Image (cartoon, grey):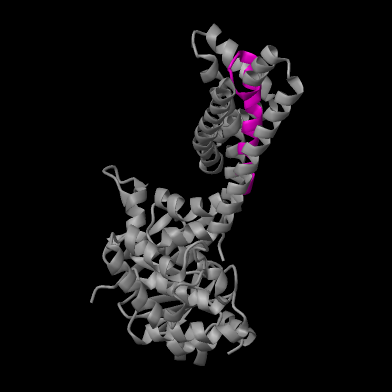
């Protein structure tokens, strides 16, 4: 089976600072991969590269058999794809953000419908039906006419996840989706993510919830200083960490 | 009758200047926010120059200087041009402020569902920015109405000059100046109330 996501030799710098120093990662359809590591290790940047929210200088990302973000011209020069192409490829991935980033001037259902109508060119009725279905799935159907400001953080995040997943992406990216939430709201969001994992959604997530990563992941990747330091099954990573660095990191994290 | 004509001109001048100035101003604000460095520099100069110049001088400049370089505008056109430029500098500044106040996550979320830059601007950023600039924008509109009186200097018979003409015939200066003042107040009162009503309607819960 050909992989859904292939990242090879990915390098990314912010000015002088190299934050990704050659990342190789492969995911199959249905994989749930958790990226863990201390802040500044490059996990979020890696996720943002997959969604083309960041440029990268070297290496390639292949999504469902298609190289994303860049192409090589006749002379072998690396060129950024046109904005329209990039927008199309971005829609192949769904992203849930730490700060939810719902559009405050639209109701929950409008938030979900916007991409369906504008990017997928769906007729309004169909978009509404799809949006309703996904809001139902995340347990937000009763609040579909509420504005984000009228929802709790956990509810906002669930709507944001529905907005991303309604686009029917090849892969879902979760960027610390519970980090901005009050502790009592974390569980309802994790439950939604877990449901999606059980359903076979391909997911790449950055998380600080070690217990959760252990439960849902098919693979856990520990990043350190812009490199993949150790990777393996949850049992290997949490049960028998090989490197000292990972052992230290886990000792300092709540499991 | 000539007073009514004057009032008509005042309204026409104000509306055209505000509409044109706002359209131009949105582009000025866009350029300030998303433009390349050189473009931002030029637009910054444009804004500072227009905001630093008295409207009175702008009006005279549009009327006299342009005709010297061969652009022949009627007094009415020159006046509307001056007020449009003035309005665009103010709108440009408030649009820039409103756009830069919107969290960067909004743009990222829009991109992540595949919206292009133009779609992001139209459906996500502009509606939020407009809500924010509305009060300041209404203020600018009332400033333009007041500034339209300055067009009397270059001979545009708007409400003020029309009033003065009536006074020169009737010598009832107090009565007619009071009347004109009241009409200006009424115009701006209506604008402000309309602005508040719109604000209430579009406020985000």
Q: Nearer the viewer, residue A60 or A181?
A: A181
Q: Residue A152: where, in percent of width, then height?
A: 57, 77
Return the x and y of residue A207 as percentages of the image width and height.
52, 78
Looking at the picture, tell me which residue is in the foreground, A1 or A97.
A97
Question: In screen coordinates, is A169 left or right of B171?
Answer: left
Q: Is residue B74 above or below residue A57?
A: above
Of the pair B164 and A245, the residue shown nearer to us:
B164
- Residue lying furthest left: A1
Does A209 sit above or below residue A79?
Answer: below
**Residue at the spot 51% in from the left edge and 19% down from the top edge:** B77
Residue B95: quadrant of the picture:
top right
Q: Is residue B194 visible?
A: yes
Point out residue B69 in the picture as x, y percentages from the top left corner: 52, 8
Q: Quadrant of residue B143?
A: top right
Q: Is residue A6 left or right of residue B24?
A: left
Q: Is residue A24 visible?
A: no
Give the side of residue A143 with respect to residue B86, left or right: left
- Quadrant of residue A162 in the image? bottom left
Q: Quadrant of the C terminus of chain A?
A: bottom right
The image shows residue B34, relative to residue A39, as above or below, that is above
In the rendered image, the quadrant that contains the N terminus of chain A is bottom left
- For the record, the magenta segment spans B134-160
- Identify the residue at horizontal 50%, vertical 32% (top origin): B20
């Amino acid at each position: 089976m050909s992989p859904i996501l292939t990242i090879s030799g990915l390098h990314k710098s912010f000015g002088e600072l190299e934050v990704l120093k050659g990342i190789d990662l492969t995911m199959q359809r249905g994989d749930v991969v958790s990226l863990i590591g201390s802040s500044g290790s490059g996990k979020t940047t890696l996720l943002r590269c997959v969604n083309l929210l960041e440029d990268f200088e070297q290496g390639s990302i292949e999504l469902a058999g298609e190289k994303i973000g860049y192409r090589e011209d006749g002379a072998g020069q690396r060129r950024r794809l046109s904005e329209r192409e990039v927008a199309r490829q971005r829609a192949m991935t769904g992203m849930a953000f730490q700060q939810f980033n719902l559009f405050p001037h639209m109701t929950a259902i409008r938030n979900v419908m916007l991409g369906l109508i504008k990017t997928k060119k769906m007729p309004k009725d169909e978009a509404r039906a799809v949006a309703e279905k996904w809001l139902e799935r995340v347990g937000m159907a009763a609040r579909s006419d509420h504005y984000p400001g009228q929802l709790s953080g956990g509810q906002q995040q669930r709507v944001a996840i529905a907005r991303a997943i309604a686009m029917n992406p090849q892969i879902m990216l979760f960027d610390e989706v519970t980090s901005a939430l009050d502790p009592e709201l974390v569980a309802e969001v994790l439950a939604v993510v877990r449901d999606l994992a059980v359903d076979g959604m391909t997911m790449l997530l950055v998380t600080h919830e070690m217990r959760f990563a252990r439960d849902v992941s098919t693979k856990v990747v520990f990043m350190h200083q812009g490199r993949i330091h150790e990777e393996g099954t949850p049992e290997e990573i949490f049960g028998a960490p090989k490197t000292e660095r990972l052992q230290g990191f886990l000792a300092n994290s709540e499991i | 009758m000539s007073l009514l004509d004057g009032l008509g001109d005042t309204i026409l001048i104000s509306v055209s200047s505000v509409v044109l100035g706002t359209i131009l101003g949105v582009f000025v604000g866009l350029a300030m926010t998303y433009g390349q460095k050189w473009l931002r520099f030029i637009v910054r100069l444009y804004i500072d120059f227009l905001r630093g110049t008295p409207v009175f001088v702008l009006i005279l400049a549009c009327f006299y200087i342009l005709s010297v370089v061969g652009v022949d505008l009627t007094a009415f056109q020159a006046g509307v041009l001056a007020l449009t430029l003035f309005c665009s500098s103010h709108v440009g500044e408030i649009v820039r402020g409103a756009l830069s106040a919107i969290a960067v996550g909004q743009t990222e979320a829009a991109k992540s569902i595949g919206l292009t830059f133009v779609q992001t601007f139209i459906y996500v950023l502009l509606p939020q920015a407009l809500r924010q600039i509305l009060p300041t924008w209404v203020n600018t509109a009332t400033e333009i109405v007041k500034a339209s009186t300055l067009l009397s200097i270059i001979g545009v018979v708007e409400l003020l000059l029309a009033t003065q003409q009536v006074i020169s015939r009737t010598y009832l200066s107090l009565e007619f100046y009071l009347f004109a003042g009241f009409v200006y107040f009424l115009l701006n009162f209506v604008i402000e109330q309309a602005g508040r009503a719109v604000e209430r309607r579009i406020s985000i819960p």
